[in-house]
Amino acid sequence: MTKLDLFFDPTKCFIGGRWVAPIGHELLPVENPSTGETIGEIARGQAADIDAAVAAAREALAGAWGKTPAFERGRILTRMSQAVLARVDDLARIEAMDVGKPLKQARADAVALARYLEFYGGACDKIMGETIPYLDGYTVYTLREPHGVTGHIIPWNYPMQIIGRSVTAALAMGNAAVLKPAEEACLTAIAFAKIAEEAGLPAGALNVVPGLGEEAGAALTAHPGVNHISFTGSLAVGELIQRAAAKNVIPVTLELGGKSPQLVFEDADLDRALPFLVNAGIQNAGQTCSASSRILVQRSIHDQVLERMAERYRALRVGPAIDDLDVGPLVSGRQQEIVGGFLGDLGGGEIAARGEVVSGAPGGGHYLAPALVSGVRPDDRLAQDEIFGPVQVVIPFDDEAEAVAIANGTEFGLVAGVWSRDGGRTMRVAKAIRTGQVFLNNYGAGGGVELPFGGVGKSGHGREKGFEALYGFSVLKTVAAWHG
Ligand code: ADP
């Protein structure tokens, strides 16, 4: 077993400010996707651990955390931000080993987590209510209050970034959080708890219970003591979460992925567009909710764009995370099978180009050469389903109306990119597209912690990131005082 060299104990849950073994004393293996080896063990939290975590969160709200002034919450989050930055190399190495992300990408996630803590730390004491003009003899004002206990169920693809956009925003508003990370990727979530402890976050404000989705996750979702659930993950599980939340009549924020298009018009600056077109599909081996998996290209430049993308694909090198190449392995054998299944059934499509798995890549790793596919029709499975791997399809269109129709022609609506030098067109298309974010002549804007993010349709609802997240993690109370 390769030694992980951690600064925390991954076999424990973090509950009420203490590091405790899961009540069932069971552990789950940690696999390194680059080699297939088991490199450690994590706690397998279950319903009883979730009960304890929710009780600890409730206690924190009634105690020190609930009484912590907003500016002091800000100072704590700011200290956590600095602590994350001081540990960036450790966090990047751990994430690379745990989920197979090339080191540079893992490092970017750690830096993003620090940036979220900085942003939300700075925002804590700047959330204000309003006074509302009303009848003679009244003063009316609003208070923005925390929900109470917030549950956070996150996936394995960007643990640190999703902790950043979800948990830190909830803490900034004064909620007490219970975090259930994905079984494939718990290490940086546990590291986050250690950092919170060291930065002086009051006991119970953050609780982390690693474990399986159908055990700890389902228990958190159904728990009557939870006041809000934030979930990022698959559509299938998102539906279960919303159903469970309905039973307790609590609000949910769901971010369920997408089939995000980039629309490339014939007047686009192709030199600028090209790197964005490809990177948005292969970053994190395509295991990104906002990955751009559909490239829609005006017919007059279709062949040229396809060939220029193909050239880039042929140069992509795939290998162990620690070697920091363009693309790492997929997170698991299961994910490799799912993506391989899509490539085994191309419908009318054909492979235009593939990247290359380097010759020394360990046999047990879950490697898959990125694939660029042409000739796919807009309603083919490959152009409709979220693949969650390094696969992009290139589809031609004739005019603006057709481009928008294809872009809007899936059940998802998370992100879109528009490439054109015609300012009027980009703004018209931005309005016509049904997604939560649209990027004009760029894509992703480098993550952008300030930019509200979320979906429409089956991509989910609610917004995380930016100030908007703080509204989502709070409830508004209206106080109407009659004083005559
Ligand atoms: P993926 O298929 O990409 O692994 P999932 O939606 O299954 O994505 O997982 C995202 C998160 O949801 C993980 O933390 C996982 O443990 C959790 N999860 C899975 N099943 C359930 C469930 N039935 N109830 C609550 N959480 C779940």
Image (tube, helix red, strand yellow):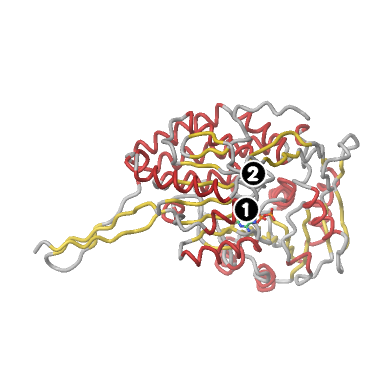
Residue that sits furthest to the front in the current view: 24
* Residue indicated by mark 2: 44
Q: Is residue 218 above or below residue 396?
A: above
Q: Mark 1 and ligand 1: say if the CB distance to the nearest ligand atom is below 8 Å.
A: no
Residue that sits furthest to the right in the current view: 359
| Place of residue 453 in the rendered image (x, y in percent of width and height, measured from the top left) | 54, 55
* Residue indicated by mark 1: 215
Which amino acid type is marked by label 1? Glu
For image coordinates 21% across by 61% down, the residue present is 140
| Place of residue 27 in the rendered image (x, y in percent of width and height, measured from the top left) | 67, 40
Residue that sits furthest to the left in the current view: 484
Mark 2 burial class by Cα count in 10 Å: few <14, some 14-19, many 20+: many
For image coordinates 55% across by 48% down, the residue present is 48
Q: Is residue 393 above or below residue 314?
A: below
| Place of residue 465 in the rendered image (x, y in percent of width and height, measured from the top left) | 50, 50
Q: Quadrant of ligand 1?
A: bottom right
Q: CA distance from mark 2 to mark 1?
A: 9 Å
First along the sequence among labels 2 and 1: 2
For image coordinates 83% across by 52% down, the residue present is 310
